[in-house]
Image (cartoon, grey):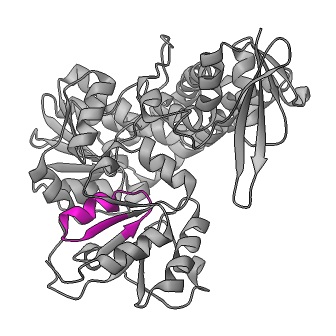
Amino acid sequence: MNRAIFYTKSNEISSEVWGQLISENDDLILDIRLDNNSDFVSISDMKNHDLDFKADLSEFTNELYHYYFIPIIFKFLHFQEIHKVQQIKFIGEHSDFYLAAGYFLEKKIEIHGLKLSKLKGYRYPIIRTFLYLKTQTITAATICLKGVQNIKAFPYKAIVKSNFALIHSKAAFKNIRKLNLELIYFYDSKNLGKLPNKNSIPLYKLISSIEYFKLFMKSLVLTHFILKRLLATSKFMLGDVGAMKAMDFFSTRVGHFIIMKKAYENIFNEHQKCKFYSGERESRYGVLAMNLSKNSKNYAIAIPHGMAYSYRYPLGLFGQKYYCTSAVEAKHLNESYNEKKFVFDSKISSTLYKRTFLGEENPKIVFFTEPRRPLVNLLIIENIKKSLTQTLFLKLHPLEKKDYYKDVKGIEFIENIDEAIQSNICISRKSTILVEALYNNSQSLALLVDEQDAYDFANTFPSLSDPRITKLYSFQDLFKYLGDVDYSVT
């Protein structure tokens, strides 16, 4: 029987995960890197993977898949499934090892090399009980607080039955508003504050005080059943270690979800057989909306913010029609899900991505940062500055702050996204900016000097396969391109 050894190799930037296949005679058959390696896990491997779980899935399933299963467990599982390994040894320290080991223990695979005290089952009833009580307490407090803050005598009643939008982010609101449709915007004021639209209603305000009181009285039971399904799903998908991480992560989110579910129920009861729009893709709110809309015969339209991922989510993506960021993305998703609901409409994309024209100016070189692994941003900025003879402009991601870049000299910040993305040379690592730039008379450059960025670009986001996006894999490539580029505004 062949066995596997998973171990790490460290370099200056990161810790790599490797896998060895060992024969019964202790001969080394294979030694391969598992992470950021397209020769091992490609876009087709993720697209075709099927999570064979037929039980009653939690509304949080897609997020478990997104945050834990694909980025952490899948690479180990792919190796184990290909080589039918039934014995695994972990060597060294890596943040992914214990979660992966917990998953394999759940599948009755023999594990060696880790501290068994961290994997033994006797710890988990204690942790699970603590997290259960924590979630119950936070949920009850959340419902009580929102009930006090939103005193209302009667539940929501529609004056006119009309189409509507469900909004949980500023980006979703901006995109859907650009379509100039007659809609009621039901929005999450926890994330958005107050929307600048006369037809907008906070989701918290759709629930009467009596309904809040009933939710509070039933919170123990409601939370129990949500946690029961979450635990069953996460234990199958992630094992014991991952299940505890998932319970901890969602413990502060269950109360808000219960409130949102009640608000959604009131909306769908009052707006049956209407079209509705959302910026959600795989989230619990997208799953919830799809489940509720079946009974009320609503038609769901997805106007997602950002690009879709290449892998196939267990509960699918929101919408009966889903507007994609590119034709490549639409083709990929239709093939992955065996559906025809994913469409690319150039007019819709132009409406969403084309910015207000500010007039012709000399093109700037603008680097758009990403909030993930910001050290890569600094590496790119410093290396571009070394050889650039003109000013480098920075447009920060909304989740980033200038303070992080306060020690960087010789750059200028652009605050206005319309100015940053229009008629410029737009450099980014792997974001929707690369697609948006194409609609704003800009040159779109993907700078892929970081190996994880290069891997994600090729395997995670189908939209970035657009041939109009120039791919550069070194700073030498970048400066050669900038030396050849025509700086005149076209």
As drawn, 305 above or below 364 = above
Q: Which residues are magenta?
A: 427-445
Query: How many labels, in total?
Result: 0
**Which residue is located at x 39 percent, y 74 percent?**
480
Within the image, what quadrant is residue 336 found in?
top left
Q: Position of residue 25 (x, y in %)?
A: 85, 13
Q: With respect to residue 14, does 76 lie above or below?
A: above
Q: Quadrant of residue 408?
A: bottom right
Is residue 5 at least partly visible in the picture? yes
Question: What residue is rendered at 79% in x and 25% in y?
Answer: 124
Question: Is 325 displayed left or right of 480 in the figure?
Answer: left
Q: Position of residue 296 (x, y in %)?
A: 20, 24
Q: Residue 99 location, x and y as percent?
A: 71, 32
User: Which of 357 and 270 lies nearest the eye of the viewer?
Assistant: 357
**122 within the magenta span:** no
Residue 339, position as x, y percentages in the image: 23, 23
Residue positioned 48% across, 14% down in the render: 56
Q: Is residue 444 magenta?
A: yes
